[in-house]
C-alpha cells in the first residue's frame, strides 16, 4: 500500500518534470529570449495580484468540472458530456437571469439549481442509452455535446441576443444574478467557496455514504456488484445525476462570477479540462482542488509567456499539458523501475527473514 | 534416461504487485523422463513454467537448454527451442476444426492461400504416428475436454516439440480419461520425448513419474526419484506439515426442504438447451453435491438459482417461495449465500480493499449505515472479526484484494458469504485452484454450517471434495441427471466416473425430488 502510494507520487512528479523538460526544449528552440520566457512561464503568475487572481479565477471552474468528471467516472462510465452539461447549465442560468426577475441571492440560487437539474438530466442520457440500447456512452456523449451546443446557440441567438452589444452575446445580466467579488483588484468571486464546498460534499458522498460505496463498487467491478444484489443500473444513473448536477451548477457559477453577458460562441472547454483534472487527481475529490490549481497555474503562466516579449506561441502550453497527461495515464510508464524497486525490497525482506519460514 | 536436456538455475521471479513467485529455484530435466513438478497452489509452479515458456521474464537466473544458455523472451522463442506447452485452460479456437487448430500459425500454403488438404493430411499423420485417434475435421467446440487436450498435445508435436510441459492436465479429466492420458504419456516417453508434469495429485505422480521436484513458497525443496519417496514424505515437503486429509463428519440429519427445483430447463446464449428437465431438492442440514465434468449444465443451474440468469423453464422454490420474479437481492434476502465459480469476476472487486469486499451484503443494515452514512467503527469491527475468523493472511483490511494469494482471496469471498451463517449456501467450485490448507479450512467451515442446520448445494469437479463433503449427490451429464445417490459412502470413484462420462445412466432417477 504505502509502497504503491510512494510510487504514484514519484510517477506523477516524474511525468510533470519530463513534460516541463520537453517544454523547455521547445521554448529554447522557438524563443528569442528563452530566459524571459521561462521566467514568465514559471513565475509570471506570481508577479502581480491580478495575475495570481487569474490563476484562482481559472481554478474555480476547473475544480467544479474536475469534481463532476470524478463522480461521473467513478461508476465506470466514460461519459464525456460534462462539457455539454457545463455549457448548457450556463444557457439555462442565462435564461433564468434574463427572463425571470428575482431578488438578489435568490435569483442566482434559483438559476444555479435549475442549471444543475438540467446538467443532471443531460449527463444521464448517455448512461441511460447505454443500458437500454447498448450504444457506447463515449460516442453518444460526444454527439450530445454538439446537440447541446447548437441548441444553446439557437436559444442565445434567437431569444436572448442583444443587438446593441456589437458581438454575439446576450443582454446584460441583472445585478441580482451576479456573484460578488471576493478579493478587490481581481475577479476572484464567491464561487470559490461554492466550489470548495462541492468538493467537500462530493468527497463525503463518494467515500462516507453507503451509496458512494456502491457507486465505487460498480465502478470497480460491475459483475461483482450485480452478483451481490446491487441495482447496478440505478446506482450508475445516480452517479451520473450527481456529477451532471455539479457540471450544470458549474456553468451557472462561471457565468455569474466572471461574465456581464453570455458570450460563449464555442464550447468553453472546461468540461474537457475536467477530465484532465480528474485524471491528475486519480478520481479522488479531495485531490481535485490541487490538480485544478496546477493546471490553472500552468495555463496562466503560459498565457503570460505568450503575451510577453519572448516570442513563444500560446500553443506551447497545450503541448506541455498534453505531454503531462499522457505520461500520467500511461500505466506502464516507469513500470520497469517499479518492478526493480519491488524486486529489491522483496529480496531484502527475504534475506532479513533468512532461511526457511 | 539420458543427460540433462534442460536446466533452470537460480531463478528469481517477482511480480509487479510484489508477490515473490520464485526464489532461487533450481531444477533440471533429463532426456526421456517424465518429471513431476509438485507444490501447493501458489507455490510457484505455474510461474516457473511461465518463465520457461517465455511468458514471464525472471529478474535473475539462467536457462540452459542442451548445454547452451538460452534467453526465452516469448512463447515463439520457446517453440523454436522445441518446447511445447499444454495449458490447463486450452488455447484453442472453438469454431475451427482440429486440423486448423493444429496447423494454426505454421499453416501449409499454396501460394498465398492456406492449403486445407495438406493441413488435414499433416494433422492426420501426426495423430497416427502418435497413436491418437481423432477426427481432424471436427470442430473444437463439439469435442469433450479430453479430446481437446489431445489436440493441444498434437499442436505441440506438430511444432516439433521435444519437451512437453503439461499444466495440471488431469484437473479437468475423468478417471477414465486420465488413464488414457497416462498411456499416451508413456508412449511419448518411449519415443524419447521429455515430459514435465505439473500436478498436486500425489497418486498420479507415483503412478507415472520417474522423478519429481517439489516447490514450496517459491523455493525448491529438492528433486527425488519417485520410487524412493513416500506420499507422506512428498506431502510433508509440499506443505511443511502433515495434511489431515479427512474431515470429521457425522451422518447428516436432513430437515425441511429449503430449495426445490422442478422440471428446470435452461438454454445457453446460443439457445441450446443445456439443462434438460431436471428436478431435485435440497434439505436443511445436508450437503447435496452436483458432480460432473465441467460444462454439463452445473453452472447454468447455479445461475438460475442465484438469480444471475432469469430466463428458465420450470419452477424454482426457495423456502417455498417461487423465485421467478425475484431479483438477486430478493433471493439473497431469503438468506441464501452464493460462493461463485469465477472468483475474480463475481467474487471480488480486486482493485478495492479487503474491507470493501467484505461488506456489500451488510452495508445497508442499520448497524452499519445510518441515514446513508457509513458507520466506520462498526464496519471496522466486523471486518476485523471476519479476517480473524477466516484466517485471511494480510497486513490489514485496507490492503487491496489483488495483493492476496488465490487461497486468501477465496477466504475473503467465503467469509463474506457465510459469516452470518446463511440457511442456504450455493457453493460453486469453492476450493478450486487454492492451496490445500485454505481448501481444507473452507471445507471444514461448510461442514460446520451443515451441522448448524444450513442446506448446502455443492457444485464441484473435484472428486475428492465430493467424496469428502457430500451426504448425497446428483451426477450431471449433458444437462441431465445421470444418477442420484442418497448415500455417497456406498459409491466408488470409478463408478462415479462412469456416470460422469455418460457410460452409465440410472433409468429411474428416483428420490431426488421431494414433495
Image (cartoon, coloured by chain):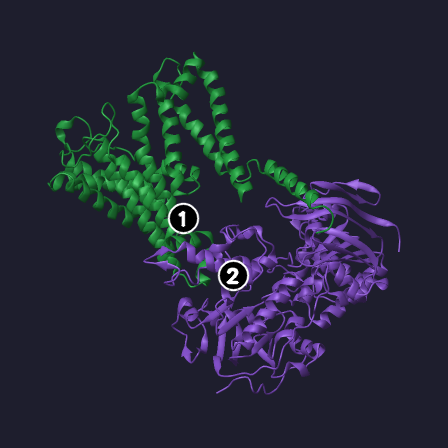
Chain colours: A green, B purple
Q: Please, is residue B451 above or below residue B142 in the view?
A: below
Q: Residues within 10 Å of mark 1 (few under 14, many from 20)?
A: many
Residue A129 can be seen, yes or no:
no
Front residue of A349 and B176: A349
Q: Quadrant of the N terminus of chain B?
A: bottom right
Q: Please, is residue B303 above or below residue A162 in the view?
A: below
| Residue A212 percent across, percent down from the top left | 38, 52
Front residue of B376 and A161: B376
Element on which disc 1 rests: helix
Q: Nearer the viewer, mark 2 or mark 1?
A: 2
* A164 lies left or right of A42: left
Element on which disc 2 rests: helix
* B21 lies left or right of A295: right
Residue in the image at 67% along x and 61% along y: B98
| Residue A155 percent across, percent down from the top left | 19, 40
Q: Which residue is mark 2?
A: B386
Q: Are marks 2 and 1 in contact (CB under 8 Å)?
A: no
Which residue is farthest right? B2
Q: Which residue is mark 1?
A: A74
What chain letter is assigned to the residue under label 1?
Answer: A
Residue in the image at 13% along x and 38% along y: A104
Q: Residues within 10 Å of mark 2 (few under 14, many from 20)?
A: many
What chain letter is assigned to the residue under label 2?
Answer: B
Amino acid at each position: 500500500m504505502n509502497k504503491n502510494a510512494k510510487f504514484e507520487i514519484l510517477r506523477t512528479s516524474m511525468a510533470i518534470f519530463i513534460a516541463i523538460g520537453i517544454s523547455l526544449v521547445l521554448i529554447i528552440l522557438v524563443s528569442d529570449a528563452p530566459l524571459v520566457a521561462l521566467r514568465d512561464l514559471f513565475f509570471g503568475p506570481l508577479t502581480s495580484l491580478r495575475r495570481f487572481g487569474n490563476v484562482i479565477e481559472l481554478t474555480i471552474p476547473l475544480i467544479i468540472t474536475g469534481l463532476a468528471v470524478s463522480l461521473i467516472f467513478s461508476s465506470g462510465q466514460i461519459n464525456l458530456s460534462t462539457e455539454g452539461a457545463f455549457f448548457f447549465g450556463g444557457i439555462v442560468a442565462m435564461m433564468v437571469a434574463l427572463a425571470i426577475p428575482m431578488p438578489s441571492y435568490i435569483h442566482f440560487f434559483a438559476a444555479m439549481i435549475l442549471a444543475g437539474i438540467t446538467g443532471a438530466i443531460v449527463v444521464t442520457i448517455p448512461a441511460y442509452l447505454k443500458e437500454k440500447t447498448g450504444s457506447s456512452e463515449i460516442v453518444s456523449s460526444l454527439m450530445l455535446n454538439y446537440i447541446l451546443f447548437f441548441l444553446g446557440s439557437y436559444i442565445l441567438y434567437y431569444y436572448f441576443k442583444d443587438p446593441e452589444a456589437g458581438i454575439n452575446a446576450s443582454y446584460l445580466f441583472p445585478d441580482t444574478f451576479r456573484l460578488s467579488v471576493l478579493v478587490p483588484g481581481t475577479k476572484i468571486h464567491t464561487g470559490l467557496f461554492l466550489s470548495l464546498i462541492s468538493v467537500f460534499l462530493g468527497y463525503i458522498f463518494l467515500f462516507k455514504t453507503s451509496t458512494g460505496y456502491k457507486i465505487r463498487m460498480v465502478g470497480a467491478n460491475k459483475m461483482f456488484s450485480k452478483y451481490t444484489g446491487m441495482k447496478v443500473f440505478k446506482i450508475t444513473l445516480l452517479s451520473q445525476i450527481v456529477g451532471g448536477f455539479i457540471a450544470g451548477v458549474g456553468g451557472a457559477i462561471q457565468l455569474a462570477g466572471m461574465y456581464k453577458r453570455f458570450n460563449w460562441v464555442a464550447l468553453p472547454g472546461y468540461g474537457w479540462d475536467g477530465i484532465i483534472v480528474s485524471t491528475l487527481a486519480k478520481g479522488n475529490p479531495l485531490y481535485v482542488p490541487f490538480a485544478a490549481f496546477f493546471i490553472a497555474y500552468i495555463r496562466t503562466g503560459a498565457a503570460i509567456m505568450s503575451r510577453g516579449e519572448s516570442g513563444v506561441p500560446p500553443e506551447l502550453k497545450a503541448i506541455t499539458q498534453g505531454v503531462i497527461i499522457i505520461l500520467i495515464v500511461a500505466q506502464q510508464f516507469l513500470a520497469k523501475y517499479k518492478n526493480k524497486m519491488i524486486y529489491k525490497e522483496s529480496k531484502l525482506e527475504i534475506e532479513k527473514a533468512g532461511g526457511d519460514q | 534416461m539420458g543427460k540433462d536436456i534442460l536446466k533452470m538455475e537460480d531463478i528469481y521471479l517477482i511480480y509487479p504487485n510484489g508477490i515473490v513467485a520464485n526464489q532461487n529455484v533450481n531444477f533440471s530435466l533429463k532426456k526421456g523422463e517424465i518429471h513431476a513438478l509438485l507444490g501447493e497452489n501458489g507455490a510457484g509452479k505455474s510461474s516457473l513454467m511461465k518463465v520457461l515458456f517465455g511468458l514471464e521474464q525472471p529478474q535473475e537466473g539462467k536457462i540452459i537448454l542442451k548445454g547452451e544458455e538460452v534467453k526465452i523472451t516469448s512463447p515463439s522463442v520457446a517453440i523454436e527451442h522445441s518446447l511445447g506447452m499444454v495449458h490447463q485452460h486450452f488455447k484453442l479456437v472453438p469454431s475451427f476444426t482440429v486440423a486448423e487448430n493444429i496447423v494454426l500459425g505454421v499453416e501449409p500454403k499454396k501460394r498465398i492461400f492456406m492449403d486445407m488438404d495438406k493441413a488435414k493430411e499433416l494433422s492426420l499423420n501426426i495423430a497416427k504416428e502418435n497413436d491418437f485417434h481423432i477426427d481432424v475435421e471436427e470442430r473444437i467446440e463439439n469435442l469433450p475436454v479430453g479430446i481437446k487436450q489431445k489436440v493441444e498435445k498434437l499442436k505441440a508435436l506438430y511444432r516439433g516439440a521435444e519437451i512437453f510441459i503439461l499444466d495440471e492436465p488431469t484437473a479437468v479429466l475423468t478417471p477414465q480419461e486420465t488413464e488414457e492420458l497416462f498411456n499416451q504419456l508413456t508412449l511419448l516417453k518411449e519415443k524419447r520425448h521429455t515430459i514435465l508434469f505439473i500436478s498436486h495429485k500425489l497418486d498420479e505422480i507415483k503412478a507415472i513419474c520417474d522423478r519429481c521436484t517439489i516447490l514450496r513458497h517459491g523455493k525448491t525443496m529438492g528433486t527425488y526419484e519417485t520410487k524412493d519417496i513416500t506420499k507422506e514424505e512428498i506431502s510433508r515437503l509440499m506443505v511443511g506439515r502433515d495434511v489431515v486429509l479427512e474431515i470429521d463428519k457425522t451422518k447428516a440429519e436432513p430437515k425441511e426442504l429449503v430449495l426445490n427445483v422442478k422440471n428446470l430447463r435452461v438454454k445457453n446464449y446460443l439457445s441450446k438447451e443445456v439443462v434438460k428437465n431436471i428436478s431435485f431438492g435440497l434439505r436443511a442440514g445436508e450437503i447435496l453435491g452436483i458432480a460432473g465434468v465441467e460444462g454439463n449444465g452445473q453452472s447454468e443451474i447455479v445461475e438460475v438459482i442465484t438469480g444471475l440468469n432469469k430466463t428458465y423453464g420450470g419452477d424454482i422454490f426457495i423456502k417455498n417461495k417461487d423465485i421467478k420474479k425475484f431479483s438477486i437481492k430478493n433471493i439473497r434476502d431469503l438468506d441464501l449465500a452464493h460462493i461463485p465459480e469465477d472468483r475474480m469476476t463475481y467474487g471480488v472487486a480486486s482493485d478495492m480493499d479487503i474491507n470493501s469486499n467484505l461488506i456489500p451484503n451488510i452495508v445497508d443494515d442499520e448497524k452499519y449505515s445510518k441515514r446513508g452514512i457509513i458507520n466506520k467503527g462498526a464496519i471496522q469491527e466486523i471486518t476485523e472479526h471476519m479476517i480473524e475468523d477466516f484466517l485471511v493472511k494480510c497486513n490489514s483490511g485496507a490492503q487491496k484484494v489483488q495483493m492476496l494469494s488465490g487461497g486468501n482471496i477465496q477466504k475473503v469471498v467465503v467469509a463474506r458469504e457465510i459469516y452470518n451463517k446463511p440457511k442456504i449456501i450455493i457453493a460453486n467450485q469453492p476450493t478450486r485452484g487454492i492451496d490445500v490448507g485454505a481448501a481444507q479450512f473452507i471445507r471444514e467451515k461448510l461442514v460446520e454450517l451443515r451441522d448448524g442446520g444450513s442446506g448446502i448445494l455443492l457444485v464441484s469437479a473435484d472428486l475428492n471434495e465430493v467424496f469428502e463433503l457430500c451426504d448425497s449427490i446428483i451426477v450431471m451429464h449433458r444437462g441431465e441427471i445421470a444418477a442420484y445417490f442418497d448415500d455417497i459412502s456406498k459409491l466408488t470413484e470409478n463408478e462415479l466416473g462412469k456416470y460422469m462420462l455418460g457410460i452409465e445412466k440410472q433409468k429411474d432417477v428416483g428420490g431426488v425430488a421431494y414433495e
